[in-house]
Every structure is written in structure tokens, then in C-alpha cells.
Amino acid sequence: MLRHVRNAWSGTFWLLISSQAALGAEVNDNRDKLDDDPTKVTTKVGVSWSDTYDMDDSNLSFSGSVALDPAKKLNARVNSDASEWRVGGSWLFPVGIVNFNFGKNEYTNGATQTNYSIGTFVPLSHFGFAPAGFQIFPMAGYTYNTGEITGCSTGNAADCKAPQFADGIPSEYGFSTITTSGSSGYLGAFTLRPLTPELTMIGFAAGSYGSKNEKGENYRGYFGGLGAGYRFDEHSSVNLLTFVMDNNTYLDDPDTRFLISYTWQFQ
């Protein structure tokens, strides 16, 4: 059973910044940042469409951010049937941005997940480090998850083997809905490389590790992707990305997808 994970950027985030040290300093100027800079505080709306390469699991979602001032914004995302959503906020500090989010994911086999996360992006260019024009943003964060998955009610997987069923396995075969919870941390990097004033290369990768799952194994996962963004003018831009995700708790196989998005930026 493939349990797909959506909202690849949901991602996002970390505990590297001291708020006490940041209170008395000036924030970075958003006007000088690229459209896809994760530390940019702006008001914008967007729409995205993603699918697997087998074209069997499409997802349409809508997103938006509202800048409250040059350093703070509110963020939200929801898919077309409201089965998946995320809301949160961001606070920009002199050397990075802190993001707070909570949301819900739903999977093709009926499993659900509610997550709460905190994290940050830190631009190395702030310290004068931008090798060959690459803007690198180390990222790290912490996430707490609760959810429901289909599992073996006896606790012994051998008692519940029913290979003839792909979805909706009836309870008489030993399967039932199991409530699960756990926490994990992640570490990685997000990278931008302007190729022209309009075209920017995008890349990201991260690994995660966390508490034990229902099988008694520590949560392990990764995600990564590549793509490009094109800026039409100061308001509108499009992105094309391909990415892969995998973990040993919510996914049975790696989930490889592509995503196309359009964003309108108000300021």
C-alpha cells in the first residue's frame, strides 16, 4: 500500500535561533531576496498541482501568506477537498526565520496524521558564504505527530498477512485502526542558484530521525528534490519541481512526485 505524503515543503523547520539575541537587531530587507527565499516575508497567494509519475494520485492545493509587518507573517495551505491542511506563522530574525506550523495529512489507505512542527532556515549568505553564487539555507526542526494507521491488532504481523487485499482490509483478517504518535527531528539544506534575473535553480534535501514506531523501530526518513523557478515580473512566478520522500512509518515505498505551482506576490 502506497501511503503518499503531500506538501513537500511542509515542511519545514528548526530550533537554531535565540530570540533574546534577536530582539534588538534589524531584520533583513525582503526586497533584495529571491522569490523562493524561505526567509522572505511577504503577502502572496498560490496554487499548486502535484502527481506521481504514474499519474494516479493527483493533488490540487491552495496556499497563502499574509505579512503582518516586515518580520512576521501568517501562512496557510489547504488541498481541494480540505482533507489536508496546514496553518502557522513565521518570525524573521537577523540571521534566519523561525516557522511554527500544525496541520493534517491524509493517505490513500485511510491513515491520517496530525503534526505540529517548529523549525528555521538560516541563510549562509548572511555570513558572506555563497560559493559560486549558491544561496544555501541550512534547515533543522522538530515535529510531533499523532495519527491513525491500519495495523495488526494482535501485535504480531505474521497473524495478519492478507496479500489478496490492497486497501480496506476487513477486521476479520486481524487488521484494525491503531492510534500512533511520535516525534522526530530533521536536518538538511535548501539551496537557490540564480541562473538569470528570471530563472532560479532550486534544490533541497534532508534526513529525519525520531522516536520508535509501532514496530519498535526508530522513525527514519528522508526527502529531497530539484527544480526551477521562473519569475515573470515582480508579482508572478512559477515553479516546476520533482521530489522523493520515504520513511519507515507512514510510507511503504518511496513516494516520487512532480509539482507545478503558480504564485502571485502582492508586496
Image (cartoon, grey):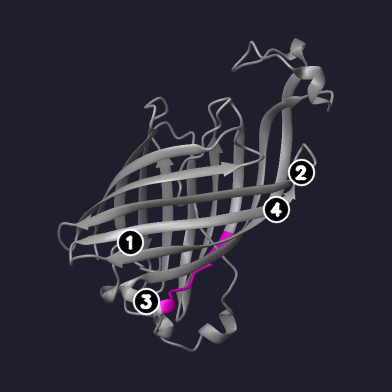
Magenta extent: 118-124
The amino acid type of the residue labelled 3 equals Pro
Question: Split into 4 quadrants, where in the image is the N terminus?
Answer: top right
- Cβ–Cβ below 8 Å for labels 4 and 3? no
* Residue 194 vertical placement versus 238 (above, below): below
The Cα atoms of the two marked residues, 4 and 1, are separated by: 29 Å
Judged left or right of residue 17, residue 218 is: right
Say which element carries label 1.
loop
The amino acid type of the residue labelled 4 equals Gly
The amino acid type of the residue labelled 2 equals Glu
Picture coordinates of residue 16, whole percent (x, y): 58, 73
The Cα atoms of the two marked residues, 4 and 2, are separated by: 9 Å
Reading the image, the residue beneath label 1 is 36
Q: Quadrant of residue 124?
A: bottom left
Say which element carries label 3.
helix
* Mark closest to the chain's N terminus, 4 or 3: 3
Picture coordinates of residue 123, whole percent (x, y): 43, 74
Question: Split into 4 quadrants, where in the image is the C terminus?
Answer: bottom left
Picture coordinates of residue 71, whole percent (x, y): 41, 74
Single out the residue that lies furthest toward the bottom. 24
Give the numbered dot on residue 131.
3
114, 38: nearer the viewer: 38
71, 163: nearer the viewer: 163
The Cα atoms of the two marked residues, 1 and 2, are separated by: 36 Å
Picture coordinates of residue 24, whole percent (x, y): 49, 89
The amino acid type of the residue labelled 1 equals Asp
Reading the image, the residue beneath label 2 is 217
Which numbered disc, 4 or 2, marks the residue closer to the eye?
2
User: Is-magenta flag for residue 235?
Assistant: no
